[in-house]
Amino acid sequence: MDTDIQRCFRSKTVFLTGATGFLGKVVIEKLLRTTEVKRIYALIRPKRGIAIKDRITTWSKDAVFELLLKSKPEALQRVCAIAGDCLEFDLGISDDDRRLLAAEVQIVIHGAATVRFNKPLHVALAINTRATKLMIQLAKEMSQLQAFVHISTAFSNCVIYNVKENFYPEHLKYSSDKVLSMAELMGDELLDNMEQELLGSFPNTYTYTKALAEDVILKEAGGLPLCIFRPAVIIAAHKEPISGWIDNMYGPMAILYGVARGILRIATFDYHAKSSLVPVDYCANLTMACAWKTIEEGSSMESQETPAIYQLAPTDENPITHGEFIQHAYKGRTNCPLTKMVWYPFIHCITVPWLFPLAAFFYHTLPAYFFDLGLWLSGRKPRLVKTYQQIHENLHVLAPFSCKSWHFDMRNTDRLRQLMSEEDRRIYYFDMVGLNWKEYFLDALGGIRQYLGKEAPTPESIAQGRKVIKRLKLLHHILLGVLCLVALLAAWLVLRILV
């Protein structure tokens, strides 16, 4: 017997943007595995030399769909690719496909976005803001539309530290329509040169253009059955479809991987600041629950002043700090060490801005030159200096978030969960209070080892990793001993000179 959410999606046609992204894949997998959705139209950007249908075909070999295909071998046939590109002024959708979507789609999940913090403003504005406006225009053509879920980010209002499930247009220096009009009138280079003036207090183009997208919805989504979902930083899967599954090297997971490989040894993190992390499967489940709630209520801008907003982040009852996050990373040294480590895994956190470049030189840059020299002498291509340049750029981009704490109100989300049936709460779980962070990170570290490190999750491989880390630990302590002796000798020489 179907649950409420399963009935909501039965025989429905869904249009999903961001289908090839981290969250998009998990949403598609959960839809196909747990509901009898009729069809999923997935907006996919064409790639040179690869047909968009072939991009879906390759999913049959992707680990994220393994569980689904065991129970429903033909499930991916219900996914139909729609050629499009959110960078284009018309979303790159053909007239025929546009008519198809307008006639058939009942549920829209708009998740397409560029999540890179340092994208040029004109690119982030086109993908994150203008595409949202174009999606709203397309949704207004859909004769059977019942729900539109816009996936934003909890950090779309990061200029304040206590974020409620409200709109905050007052924090924008210029409204979305004015910024989009300026973008049409001026070239990309001129717009990018105005970045500092336009962003105001926003730390990067990602959070700014996501805030503008919410302003677009506030101004232009009148009459649509629409809601907004704001997840915090999305990380590896907790339970489904595979514990610890991850397919990208962004944000916190990149930090965990960098520490596990012994590459990342210094970072700008405040141990006591709160981390805003949510597993990707929780986000997929809440996305589907948001669609169900919107359909159940017949929610529209005509029946309420503004669309409902649902936020998902760690709760006050079950928080996690950056320090706890780092401690969980250390547990990977004994539980699931990599076999390909550059050095013994450790990390020191620095919150003094002027001290970081000095520490990074001795912890990262100087060892990298010695490492690359060894590669060059052995006839291999040097690579570590360039890697550290990228790491330092990424740490600089993350700096505004690494030493501060945010509180995200989740009253709407909690109320939504309470309205769900017991069975729906079990299948479409997103209760952050019940998340055991210790158990979660044990699985996440294993997933990082398998899916990012490309190392087999076998006892033999883990045993080999433990041998490697034991050897590196010995070398690490020998090096520390030598450095201490050198420091003591230098201090003794200085004292002799002074005395």
Image (spheres, rainbow, N blue to C red):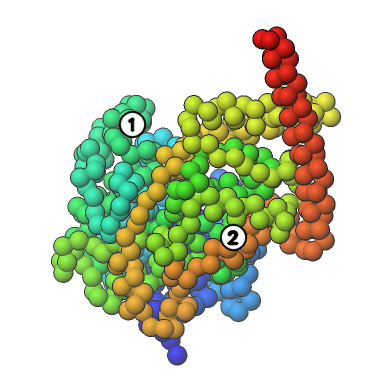
Where is residue 172, by image quadrant?
top left
Most foreground residue, 261 or 48: 261
Residue 86 placement (x, y as % from top left): 40, 48
Between the residue at mark 2 and the residue at mark 1, the CA separation in whole angstroms equals 37 Å
Mark 2: amino acid: Phe
Where is residue 313, by image quadrant?
bottom left
Residue 194 placement (x, y as % from top left): 31, 28
Of pointers 2 and 1, the one earlier in the residue sequence: 1
| Mark 1 crowdedness (10 Å alpha carbons): few <14, some 14-19, many ≥20 | some
Residue 200 placement (x, y as % from top left): 29, 35
Q: Does residue 484 lie above or below 111 as drawn?
A: above
Q: Does residue 178 lie above or below 299 as drawn?
A: above
Most foreground residue, 178 or 102: 178
Residue 123 visible in the snapshot: no
Which disc, if any, is residue 195? 1
Question: What residue lies at 66% left-to-right and 10% top-to-bottom?
Answer: 498
Q: Quadrant of the C terminus?
A: top right
Residue 156 placement (x, y as % from top left): 34, 49
Which disc, if any, is residue 337? none
Q: Dot 2: what SS?
A: helix
Question: What residue lies at 41% left-to-right and 83% top-to-bottom?
Answer: 422
Name the residue tied to disc 2. Answer: 441
Horizontal side of 283 relative to 159 (left or right) equals: right
Q: Dot 1: what SS?
A: helix
Most foreground residue, 489 or 165: 489
Question: What residue lies at 64% left-to-right and 32% top-to-bottom?
Answer: 364
- Indicate which label's residue lies in the foreground, 2 or 1: 2
Q: Does residue 98 lie above or below 182 as drawn?
A: below
Question: What residue lies at 74% left-to-right and 34% top-to-bottom?
Answer: 480
Mark 1: amino acid: Glu
- Spot the residue most to the bottom: 1
| Mark 2 crowdedness (10 Å alpha carbons): few <14, some 14-19, many ≥20 | many
